[in-house]
């Protein structure tokens, strides 16, 4: 991998990680369209450490408060009813599905799941799901002639059941094209949470999963055409770009609809299918570099 490739892929990772359009799919597609080798699942997981570091800094006050309350709850029974302490436990509970499935499906994640036909399918299907979830949220928030405004849930209403559902939604993102934020935000909206609450828990829930995945994949750096230097460079680029994107996105979702992302996902999926059908693009273009 050249330094230019690593810069472009780091830029793509930073731009797409927090948007509900799938960063892993865009890394795969960028390489395929440019005629480069597929950077592989290991490169994707490690560069996500950069964007997740941006989450740690952006939500540093929330994270510090949650960690402090959670640690105190281990010895202080009274603290176990504290919302921040409960959030700590709920992030752990929500992380279980992706941890189990990530290890179980490792071979599929690094192989068949990276087929461009599957990526196109998940882009379209999850785009439709996100669109439905967004419309339901908008209807509750706006009310209507024959409907009153329906109050949606916040993170104070989050329990173990909802935390596990969020977790299984996040685990779906093991398939490129699903989108970690897209799946968890869609799940949150369908369960009745506000856009801001769904996005906030989505980002917090991703922290242990992404850091653990990135650490696990460190052993594979240096294999194939992906080496340490370009990987670290891409990770740094992803951090700076990702921080800017997350700050913008958290402001965007408080007043705007997810429909632009829905339309983009569906159109991109259709374009990929057309390119494959016409023979302009191979389903396994680039082939995984391992």
Image (cartoon, rainbow, N blue to C red):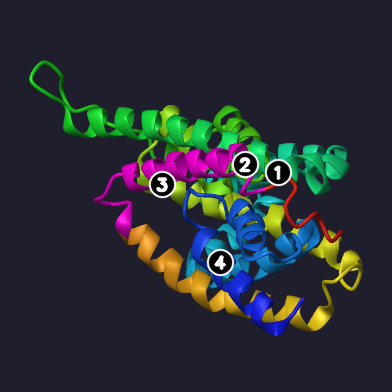
Task: Return the x and y of residue 249 as percentages of the image width and height.
Answer: 38, 60
| Residue depth check, mark 1 versus mark 3: number of the one nearer the observer | 1
Picture coordinates of residue 285 (x, y %)? 72, 52
The image's mark for residue 276 is 2
Mark 2 and mark 4: Cα distance apart in space: 22 Å
Q: Which residue is mark 3?
A: 264
Q: Residues within 10 Å of mark 4 (few under 14, many from 20)?
A: many
Q: Residue at x 68, y 68 (%)?
A: 47
Q: On the rendered image, what quadrant is the C terminus found in? A: bottom right
| Mark 1 element type | loop
Mark number for residue 82?
none
Q: How many marks?
A: 4
Cα–Cα gap, marks 4 and 1: 21 Å
- Up-down relation of residue 36 to residue 91 (above or below): below
Classify mark 3: helix, strand or loop: helix
Task: Choose top left, top right, bottom left or bottom right for residue 141.
Answer: top left
Look at the numbered disc 2 and give the secondary structure of its residue.
helix
- Residue 12 shows which numbered tag? 4
Q: Quadrant of residue 203?
A: bottom right
Q: Secondary structure at mark 4?
A: helix
Principal secondary structure, stretch drawn in magenta: helix
Q: Are marks 4 and 3 in contact (CB under 8 Å)?
A: no
């Amino acid at each position: 991998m050249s330094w230019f490739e690593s810069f472009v892929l780091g830029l793509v990772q930073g731009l797409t990680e927090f948007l509900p359009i799938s960063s892993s799919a865009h890394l795969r597609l960028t390489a395929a369209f440019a005629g480069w080798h597929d950077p592989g699942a290991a490169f994707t997981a490690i560069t996500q450490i950069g964007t997740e570091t941006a989450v740690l800094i952006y939500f540093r006050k929330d994270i510090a408060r949650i960690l402090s309350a959670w640690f105190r709850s281990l010895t202080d029974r009274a603290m176990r009813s504290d919302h921040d302490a409960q959030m700590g436990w709920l992030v752990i509970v929500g992380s279980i599905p992706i941890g189990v499935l990530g290890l179980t499906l490792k071979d599929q994640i690094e192989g068949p799941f990276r087929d461009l036909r599957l990526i196109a399918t998940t882009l379209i299907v999850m785009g439709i799901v996100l669109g439905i979830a967004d419309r339901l949220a908008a209807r509750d928030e706006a009310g209507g002639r024959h409907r009153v405004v329906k109050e949606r849930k916040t993170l104070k209403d989050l329990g173990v059941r909802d935390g596990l559902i969020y977790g299984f939604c996040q685990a779906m993102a093991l398939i490129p094209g699903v989108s970690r934020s897209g799946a968890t935000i869609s799940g949150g909206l369908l369960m009745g949470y506000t856009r801001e609450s769904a996005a906030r828990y989505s980002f917090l829930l991703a922290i242990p999963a992404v850091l653990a995945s990135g650490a696990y994949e460190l052993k594979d750096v240096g294999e194939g055409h992906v080496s340490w230097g370009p990987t670290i460079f891409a990770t740094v680029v992803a951090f700076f770009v990702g921080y800017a994107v997350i700050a913008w996105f958290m402001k965007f979702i408080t007043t705007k609809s997810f429909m632009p992302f829905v339309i983009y996902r569906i159109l991109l999926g259709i374009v990929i299918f057309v390119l494959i059908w016409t023979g302009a693009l191979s389903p396994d273009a680039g082939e995984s570099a391992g």
